[in-house]
Image (cartoon, grey):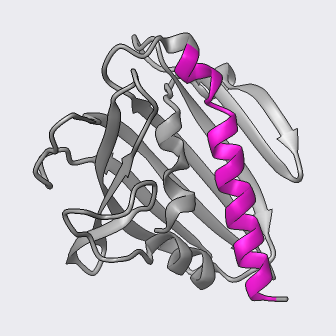
């Protein structure tokens, strides 16, 4: 999972009934919805697009990442380990200008093959899987999924995600980035995968 996947660290999220989703952006064949999440002051998002590529290409793009190391590059997802063939542990760190504290997150992706044409990658925080760094806030709450649905020569890609950014960041600041981050992620994912086939 390369840097495109974790731009969402700039954002938080929430989860209620389907009818509570509000369309926040619909541009370049990328649609993003947001909604409140339980009792959290932060919101969650759902982003969708269709990409002209194969299901295997999308899975590979989401799961491939450089190996984790103590001084790993900021802003890029790194693979910590694979617990088994279907469980991947990733680490990513984001640096922010003072006075905002740097943040990092350790997440676990479980790959579930629903059918020949549908795969779900569940995402959950596993904050204790990697030792914490000084002067860096570790994200404790993160949950969501990628849903990949193949249809002919295209794949419908959906990501739904909630993140609590921790610390003293005001919800109005983080919620304002809720659309920007996923839109960049999906734009990059779409460009990368469609260039593979061109």
- Judged left or right of residue 16, residue 54 is right
Left or right relative to 135: residue 58:
right
Q: Nearer the viewer, residue 63 or 111?
A: 63
Kindly identify the residue that appears in the image at 10 percent across and 51 percent down: 131
Percent coordinates x, y for residue 77 in the rendering: 41, 62
In this picture, is 167 found above or below 81? above
Instruction: Judge from the rendering whether residue 118 lies leftward or rightward of residue 125; answer left or right.
Output: right
Residue 156 is at least partly visible in this image: no
Relative to 144, residue 23 above or below? above
What residue range appears in magenta?
Answer: 173-197
Residue 76 to residue 69: above or below: above
- In the displayed structure image, the side of residue 85 where residue 56 appears, left or right: right
Residue that lies at the very extreme toward the front in this rendered image: 98
Q: How many marks?
A: 0
Residue 127: image x %, image y %?
A: 19, 44
The residue under the point 51% across, 80% down is 60
Provide residue 195's location: percent of width, then percent of height.
79, 81
Q: Is residue 185 in the magenta section?
A: yes
Q: Quadrant of residue 96?
A: top left
Q: Is residue 79 magenta?
A: no
Residue pictured at 85% horizontal, 89% vertical = 198
- Residue nearest the observer in this picture, 37 or 19: 37
Of helix, strand and loop, which mostly describes the magenta segment? helix
Residue 196 showing in the rendered view = yes
Picture coordinates of residue 107, whole percent (x, y): 30, 53
Q: Residue at x 14, y 55 (%)?
A: 130
């Amino acid at each position: 999972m390369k840097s495109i996947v974790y731009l969402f660290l700039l954002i938080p999220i929430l989860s209620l009934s389907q009818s509570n989703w509000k369309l926040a952006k619909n541009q370049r064949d990328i649609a993003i919805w947001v909604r409140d999440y339980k009792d959290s002051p932060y919101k969650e998002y759902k982003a969708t697009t269709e990409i002209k590529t194969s299901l295997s290409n999308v899975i590979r793009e989401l799961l491939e990442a450089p190996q984790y190391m103590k001084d790993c590059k900021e802003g890029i997802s790194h693979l910590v380990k694979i617990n088994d063939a279907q469980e991947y542990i990733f680490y990513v760190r984001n640096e922010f200008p003072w006075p905002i504290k740097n943040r990092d997150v350790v997440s676990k992706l479980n790959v579930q093959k629903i059918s020949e044409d549908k795969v779900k990658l569940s995402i959950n925080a596993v904050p204790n899987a990697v030792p914490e760094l000084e002067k860096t806030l570790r994200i404790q709450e993160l949950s969501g999924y990628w849903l990949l649905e193949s249809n002919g020569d295209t794949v419908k890609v959906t990501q739904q995600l909630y993140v609590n950014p921790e610390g003293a960041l005001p919800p109005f600041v983080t919620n304002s980035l809720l659309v920007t981050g996923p839109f960049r992620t999906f734009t990059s994912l779409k460009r990368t995968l469609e260039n593979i086939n061109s």
